Image (cartoon, grey):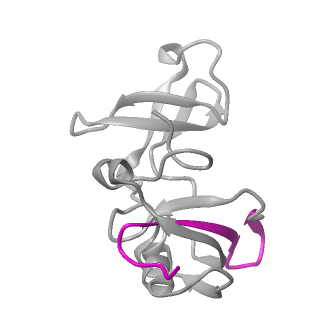
Amino acid sequence: MKITKDTAVTLHIKVADAAGKTINDGKQPTVYLHGGYENIFPKIEAALDGQEPGFQVNMALAAEDAFGARDEALARTIPKAEFPPGVKVGGQLQGTDNEGRERIYHVVKIKGPVVHLDANHPLAGVALQVSVKVADVRAASSEEIAHGHVHGEHGHHH
C-alpha cells in the first residue's frame, strides 16, 4: 500500500545532530497518521508521500524544519526559595510565561540561589540528520482519522 492521506505509517527513524551524535537510534517504531495532521515534521511527510514499505530516505533538517529556532524569551530564572522541593536538574515544572500562557519548563541548571528554566523544546535550534525507513502502511480507521492520530501499539492511547 502506498502512503497517501489517511494512512497509518510505521517508521524507524534514526536522528542525529549535525555533528553526527545519535539522538534517537530508531529501534522503537514511530507510527503517525499521514495527510497534514501535524504528527510528523512536514518535510519528512512530504518525502514519504506516495512511497511504500521498504522505502528509505536520509534528510538534513534545518532547526526551523524540526523543532524550530530557540526563543530566548522562553528561558527564565526563579529564586531557589520559590522552587518546589524534590524537583532536580532535568525535571519539569508547569508554569506561566510572561504573557500568562501555560508552559512546561525544563530545569536546566541550579546555581546558588537561582534556578534556570527553559520552555523551549530541548532540540530547539538544532539542525538534525534524519534517516527514515518505512516499515508498514495501512488504511487508518475512521476513528483515527476523526481523532487526527493513530491508535494502538506505538500510537496514541486514550
Query: Which is more toward the observer, 139 or 92?
Result: 139
Q: Quadrant of the C terminus?
A: top left
Number of callouts in the render?
Answer: 0
Judge left or right: residue 47 versus residue 37: right
Residue at position x 55%, y 31% from top?
92
Give residue 55's position: percent from left, percent from top.
64, 86
Residue 57 vertical placement versus 94 (above, below):
below
Judge left or right: residue 121 versus residue 34: right
Give residue 32's position: percent from left, percent from top.
49, 61
Residue at position x 53%, y 79% from top?
1
Residue 158 vertical placement versus 72 (above, below):
above
Judge left or right: residue 106 versus residue 75: right
Q: Which residues are magenta?
A: 1-24
Query: Which is more toward the observer, 112 or 153?
Result: 153
The reply to whether residue 80 is in sight is yes
The reply to whether residue 125 is in sight is no
Residue 55 vertical placement versus 45 (above, below):
below
In the figure, residue 21 lies in which quadrant?
Answer: bottom right
Query: Which is more toward the observer, 148 or 142?
Result: 142
Give residue 122's position: percent from left, percent from top.
57, 53
Give residue 53's position: percent from left, percent from top.
63, 79
Residue at position x 55%, y 44% from top?
152
Residue 142 falls within the magenta-colored stretch: no
Residue 65 vertical placement versus 75 (above, below):
below
Residue at position x 26%, y 38% from top?
98
